[in-house]
Image (cartoon, rainbow, N blue to C red):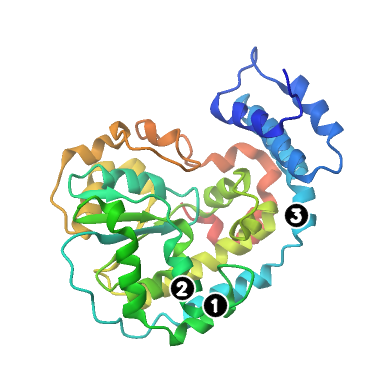
Amino acid sequence: MLRPKFYQAWFALISLERQRPNNHYLDTLKPLFDSAKGDVEGRLLLGHAIAKTLEDLGRFEESFDWLEKAKAGKRAQIRYRQQNDARIFEAAKTLSVQTAAPSPVQTQNLPIFIIGLPRTGTTLVDRILASHSEVASAGELELFAWLIKEKTGTKTGSVIDAETFRSAASIDWIDVGNAYLENIRALGHGARLVTDKTPHNFLYAGLIHRALPQARIITLRRGAMDSCLSNYRQLFATHKEAFNYTYALEDVAAYYREFDALAAHWRTHLPADRFMEVHYEDIIRDQENQTRRLLAFCGLDWEAACLQFQDNAAPVDTASSVQVRQRLHGDSIGRWKRYGNRLDRLKTALGALAEEE
């Protein structure tokens, strides 16, 4: 090993390969973690690598303990406050009930927004739809949020914040819609429909409808316990404030509760022919009928290729890049039950939502 303290490489290596009882690096990783005192990012990477190894070895409760060790320093460093995100969710709701702007006339590059909490099946749905001959995937763009930030002109340090949502009341929605369509034109390669799989666009569903009333919006849902665990055990881009809720279990639970309330808000205020919810577990258990439902919502004819999404050769640049190359399986449903009493705090924090699946 030329650079044993190249922690990013260790994290990548463990992430890409299943660790086995006779082939793992725990004896190397644990001392590296101990020696990385004061290195918040290093411990985050190493701790996640150790937790993933232990999970692969079936030692789930130990795995969770290492996740807590890995994240503790980062959580203290960023000083996350649940109320800051709560204000963003509340501001997002205030602009959702107004009439949509006149729709730009177009026959190509009609957008489909695939939204939802990360790690809940957004990439899966993107691959299913992009396997249709009339659909192209633009990937994870973050474009709409940047357009709102640009058009409002707010000087806050974050792209997503309550002030920007509040300032959006006065912007020209036709201008936003046209700017979005112009930006995705080349990404659509002439396809009739183009998917934008940016999970955090769930905050913007009301604004998306105002700017692009022809757009379809598909929200992914997943059981609360599995959703929260999946967000907690995933190491997202550490420089993005949108993921700051993922460093403590109670913060993840609070964020899920806000998301659930916002999804209910969209369900009430957005037209049923423009907004739909799809449950990850339903796709796993009833793939064909759920695929037909997705295609019908998007105005697409049936194509059997959508059932073979794992054969889609297009590149994937998300945390689900390995899974979407595989056939559907239900191994991740009920994953939270493997962690014993370690998730009791999560269950308590979620309350009745914890019974969802």
**Residue indicated by mark 3:** 75
Q: Is residue 187 left or right of residue 48?
A: left
Tell me, yes or no, whether the two marked residues, 1 and 2, touch with CB atoms within 8 Å.
yes
C-alpha gap between disc 1 and disc 2 = 8 Å
C-alpha gap between disc 1 and disc 3 = 25 Å
| Dot 1 amino acid type | Thr
Where residue 350 sits: x, y (%)?
60, 60
| Dot 3 amino acid type | Arg
Q: Quadrant of residue 11?
A: top right
Say the numbered circle drawn on residue 148.
2
Q: Earlier in the sequence, mark 1 or mark 2?
A: 2
In this picture, is 59 found above or below 125?
above
Tell me, yes or no, whether the two marked residues, 3 and 2, touch with CB atoms within 8 Å.
no
Q: From the image, state whether disc 3 or disc 2 is nearer to you.
A: 2
Figure quadrant of the N terminus:
top right
**Residue indicated by mark 1:** 164
Tell me, yes or no, whether the two marked residues, 1 and 3, touch with CB atoms within 8 Å.
no
Which residue occupies 22% across, 60% down?
Answer: 297
> Quick one: which residue is furthest to the top in this view?
22
Which residue occupies 58% across, 72% down?
Answer: 161
Which one is nearer the viewer's eye here, 319 or 19? 319
- Report whether residue 59 is seen: no
Q: Residues within 10 Å of mark 1 (few under 14, many from 20)?
A: many
Which one is nearer the viewer's eye here, 170 or 203? 170
